[in-house]
Image: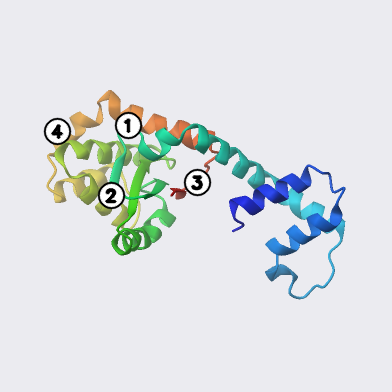
Amino acid sequence: KPEAAAIKRFYEEKRLRFEKPEQVRVEFVALNQAKLMESATVSDDEIKAWYQANEKRYKQAEQRQGVIGENAASIFRGAGDLVAGNPEGDVTVVEFFDYNCSWCKRGLPEILALIEEDKNVRLVMKEFPIFGADSEYAARAALASAAQGKYWEFHLALLGHEGKVSKQTVDEIAAAQGLDVARLKADMEKPEIKDNIERNRQLGQAMAIEGTPAFIVDG
């Protein structure tokens, strides 16, 4: 994927309305080297069409950078955030995820390897349920499990579950992890649990996050 700086540079070129086509051509080629292996020439119309096809993504990237700057405290050190890895690490990785996201599940081993290999990484987990009522239930249960000191273990068990994480699955995994399920369900109804998820949703919406997993790195 193009780096944020490259996207910004290309966007600035677009604002020139292709008055300097050679500069735009250089950026286009730099971002599409693999696609151009078999083609020695690229027309300005092709460049413009390519940009227009990707314009939404570029605008989202620009919007996201602005929101990150304005909301850095809430994103990287928000109230109620659950943290793994080194809580005092100088590199913070924020993950927005859903327990029914197949890509989140597939990426779990890489996340675990990251915090194991780099002891300076601080992992912030943002519950971001986007796949319906079951995901919402799982997110609330996970946050509530922190009151029993079991968030990390429960989090890993939920993400490690093969197949759909239903409400019944959440309850079964909670019991298997040694959680007091009755207490868990009571804690799930506390206002701060719903507020945590709502804050994450607002941040995600502001940054145009439309899917999971989504990562933000600071440091």
Q: Is residue 33 left or right of residue 195?
A: right
Say which mark, if any, is on residue 84: 2
Q: CA distance from mark 4 to mark 1?
A: 22 Å
Q: Are marks 4 and 1 in contact (CB under 8 Å)?
A: no
| Marks 2, 4: nearer the viewer | 2
Q: Residue at x 32, y 53 (%)?
A: 159
Q: Locate the N terminus and report the quarter of the image it occupies.
A: bottom right
**Amino acid residing under circle 1:** Ala
Residue highlighted by disc 4? 183
**Amino acid residing under circle 4:** Arg
Q: Is residue 208 left or right of residue 188?
A: right
Where does the image place residue 94, in percent across and percent down from the top left? Answer: 40, 46
Q: Could you say whether the residue bearing mark 3 is in a helix, strand or loop?
A: loop
Q: Residue at x 80, y 72 (%)?
A: 39
Decide: few, some or many residues near mark 2? Use Cα within 10 Å; few <14, some 14-19, many ≥20.
some
Decide: few, some or many residues near mark 1? Use Cα within 10 Å; few <14, some 14-19, many ≥20.
few
Q: CA distance from mark 2 to mark 4?
A: 24 Å
Q: Could you say whether the residue bearing mark 4 is in a helix, strand or loop?
A: helix
Please say if 177 is above or below 187: below
| Marks 1, 3: nearer the viewer | 1
**Amino acid residing under circle 2:** Ala
**Amino acid residing under circle 3:** Gly
- Give the mark nearer the N terminus: 4 vs 1: 1
Residue highlighted by disc 1? 79
Q: Could you say whether the residue bearing mark 1 is in a helix, strand or loop?
A: loop
